[in-house]
Image: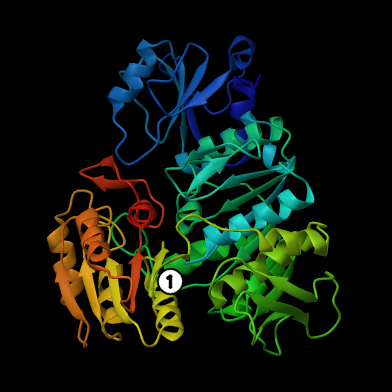
Amino acid sequence: MYRLSFEDVQSILINSNQLRETVHSDKWYYEVKDKKLLNETFDAITYNSKEVSHGSLFICKGETFKVDYLKEAVNQGVQFYISENYYEDVDATGFIVNDIREVMALIAREFYGRPDEKIKVIGITGTKGKTTTTYLLKNILDTYKPEKTAVISTIEIILDGKNAVRSSLTTPEAMDLFQMIAQAHDNGMEYLAMEVSSQAYKMKRVYGMTFDVGAFLNISPDHIGPNEHPNAEDYFYCKSRLMLNSKVSVLHSSLDHLDYLKELSDTASYKSILYGPDTDINDYTYKKSDDDRRQFQITSEDADPLQLNGEYKINMLGDFNKENALCAAIAASTLGVDQASIQKGIAQTSVPGRMEHFTYGTNEIYIDFAHNYISLKTLFDYVVAEHPDHDLTIVLGAPGNKGLSRRKDMGEILSAYQGRVILTEDDPNREVVRNISEEIAKYIDGPIQVLFNDSREEAIRSILNDLKPEDKKVIVLAAKGSDRFILRHGVKEDYIGDDGLVKQFLDQ
């Protein structure tokens, strides 16, 4: 169904200034002229040596790439490859390029017929709230046009409007991403709501794409460490690229370097819309209801060009979710969605593992995916303010081999609260759980009691089993949300989920 010719690939590489040389039968070329070679066609592109055939174009990508992968592909019939390196002892024609990640995105986009131009794509970035905002959009768009919206999120991927599969990356690799967008279009989807991580731009997974709407929710340092971002500037820079590549930028007015972000949007000849709490600089604001914590009002300071002014109800708790809903409403309205659909879509949205709330007698239990400074502080502040007369218990951990800066952040945040925290596992991967927990603990300097339990499941079960209906406790299970796995030693091992443990306890 999809094809590229040798000539197509050569043109893409030359026009993008990516081609270093093409090596065919030990001869080097800049531009191959042989018609037989130019007419060679590729009916598949892949970077997986176990998924190749005679007609595949093989991409050699990744810092851990080994020439053995290419040799395996050649043994399976591959005759052409693209790489940043020339492999003399491999019997195949090589396109040698400058930046394999840029090339992978360019080739994939063309191979799948530029599918991002055939569907309305909304990209959501930010340190927290990406998944929630994506699902708010999904529900709004489904209300407007049922089962016409695809989703690519941290939780799952939906390419036919209804059936979901678990995702492994917030934003997939470029080759997988463009294949997914093409599949969504082939399935009749008209919209795609997707999370755009900082890594998506750092690793060039969305290179070459222009988004119909790009939303930037918030920013605080995260994903800083080996194999991620070297510093906060790089983290912010990568996220800000969305504004250079979105026809409409929806920006929270509290963002750092807001004028810079607006300038990026202006530089690209696009427009920006500001939102947030009640301030003079916002195009749209929200106001809370004094009578109903799930009710809020959208207002505009001047005219109401998007016709959003009015009353809204949201199923999820917390002012931050009202902000997410406001952002989703603006994004949807720019795509032509009517206000009634927006109101109904917001009202019926719930997201697994995001501000899930349960009660047991006079006890309150919250489950949230919060795992970095801004999301944890927002979560804890909300819970304490809502239940000031309840004893606070927090279950929390940090992942292994990534986001190392989070450990200090967690310790400093926990220092500000009364109660107790049980430090436990959260995808420890190849690190020792207790070592991670002790690193968090060394930054805690406050009244909170610190306990350790290396098993997340045991930690949560022990807290729940000690509860009595007449207690006044508030339990916060943070960071894992509805995840059905725990990553240990490079393997995702099955896990019932924080929400699964709570539901099991309440059922019993």
Which of the pair 5/443 is nearer the observer? 443
Disc 1 crowd, CA 10 A, few/some/many (<14, 14-19, 20+): many
- Answer yes or no: is residue 405 visible: no
- Answer yes or no: is residue 203 visible: yes
Image position of 244 (left or right of 311):
left
Outermost residue to the front: 470
Q: Secondary structure at mark 1?
A: helix
Q: Tell me the quarter of the image containing the N terminus.
A: top right
Expressed as whole percent of the image width and height from the top left, the position of residue 463 reads 24, 65
Image position of 308 (left or right of 505):
right
Residue at left offset 30%, top offset 85%: 417
Which of the pair 64/286 is nearer the observer? 286
Residue at left offset 23%, top offset 49%: 429
Expressed as whole percent of the image width and height from the top left, the position of residue 285 reads 70, 81
Tag 1: amino acid: Ser
The quarter holding residue 432 reads bottom left
Residue at left offset 20%, top offset 86%: 445
Expressed as whole percent of the image width and height from the top left, the position of residue 456 reads 23, 56
Image position of 374 (left or right of 402):
right
The quarter holding residue 408 reads bottom left
Disc tally is 1
The quarter holding residue 23 reads top left
Residue at left offset 15%, top offset 77%: 442
The colour scheme applied to this rendered structure is: rainbow
Expressed as whole percent of the image width and height from the top left, the position of residue 213 reads 70, 58
**Residue receiving disc 1:** 375
Q: Is residue 487 above or below residue 82?
A: below
